[in-house]
Amino acid sequence: MNDPFLAISRLAVLVLVPAVLLVPLLLGLLARTRVGSESERFAVRARASALVLATLAALAVWLGSLLTGMLGPRIPALEWVAQLSWLLFFPLWFGFALPLLQAKDPELGPGRSAPGGTLRSASLSPRHREAPIPPGHWVAGLLVAALFTAAIAARGLWGPFADDGERGRWLVLLGFQVATVALAAALVPFAVRRGLSEPEPLDAAGSAELGELYHSHRHARARGTFWVFLVALPSAVGVLATLAAWSGPGIGAPLGPAALLAPLLAVFAGAWFGISTTARRYRIHELRARLEGRSVGGADAG
Amino acid sequence: MISVSLDSPVPLHDQLVAELRRLIAAGRLAKGDELPPVRQLAGDLGIHLNTVARAYRDLADAGLLASSRGRGTVVIANVARPNGRPAEERQRIEAALAAALTEAKLAGLPEAETRALLERWIAELWDPEREVPSRTPPAP
């Protein structure tokens, strides 16, 4: 019997997972190199090689688990590994691609916002007073999280559990959901506020164009932080936990692909947020360099 | 906007204090205006937190700023209705002006240029809406 949900799940594993794993490699290799010294270029080549090898290893994990888990002897545990291997995006991006990008352009590294010239200018507007997230959005985000929590809790009221193991699993899922929502509610407002105060050095003349670029960047970052870490990720966890809490004989097949797609969408949202934030920072640094008349080093592609 | 120069022989703290005093005197920072937090201004200028904190503290001691939890650092000086006593300050101000003009003379600055400098600063502080040519950061 054909199961469309199973087909969707297999398609996601075959296409989306390797695509996600290749994103850090593509972005890392395509970024321009803005360093000139031989030692800096050597560091770039070393990090690029590390990224290539790490990506090949991640793809090997995906392909190996795919071939043995789904297409070969059908080992269920390896099937899960193939489905969840998109998680390797995070170590690839943060552990290999970002260091390569920072080696190619040191201004993206720690202290990346340090002003360049000896004449330093700054705005006197207190940015932490800005409110890029409307109050209604905060309420809506927490409401969505509360609904998922209620959906999981409702399982306890629905009917008796098959055994103590099922009840224990439900309690763990409920606790995990509550902890996720509580952490997000506690940390995201703090992260948004700290992000608004990130250093924004102006050029000597205090260019309005640069000021506006900073403004759009910090508001986009605040909104991204809110939507990814208070809405998307807790919702993905909520979907997984709700499905797991209510899953049982006869309703497992369609829930599997949904349980794969929900966190995958959340990861795509997070990846888009991270990549677009990095791209905006690039534009800001390029504009600052142009306004300050600074050299940006040897500009080679790749 | 505020600017400091790392190349200036004037310490950064003194530059900050002088710039903020100038902005308050020119009315660009009005009573009730909130200044950025110490961390924000220090990060934007790329200077030490303590430099900014000390500048804020000194201006608070001079009665120009006030800091409190929740409200941040705000300007409390009212240039439109100053609380100072200009008649008593006149002797001190005249002495400071005399010292500055003596320095200009000893440095060989022509009279016309000295007069132009004075007029530019008077315009900047008493008529801040007028466009003035760019200047170097002021001494404290």
Image: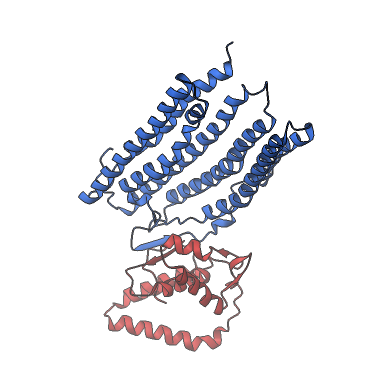
Chain colours: A blue, B red
Image side of residue A239 versus residue B91, left or right? right
Residue A288 appears anywhere in the view: no
A141 vs B140, nearest the viewer: A141
**Residue B97 location (% of width, % of height):** 41, 83
A123 vs A230, nearest the viewer: A230
Q: Quadrant of residue A25?
A: top left
Which residue is farthest left? A38
Position of residue A31 relative to residue A5, above or below, is below
> Which quadrant, please, contains the N terminus of chain A?
top right
**Residue A98 location (% of width, % of height):** 38, 44
Q: Residue at x 40, y 44 (%)?
A: A95
Q: Residue at x 45, y 47 (%)?
A: A213
**Residue A73 location (% of width, % of height):** 46, 20
Position of residue A164 relative to residue B113, above or below, is above
B117 vs A95, nearest the viewer: A95
Residue A6 appears anywhere in the view: yes
Q: How many marks?
A: 0
B113 vs A23, nearest the viewer: A23
**Residue B116 location (% of width, % of height):** 36, 72
Image side of residue A169 versus residue A292, left or right? right
> Which quadrant, please, contains the C terminus of chain A?
top left
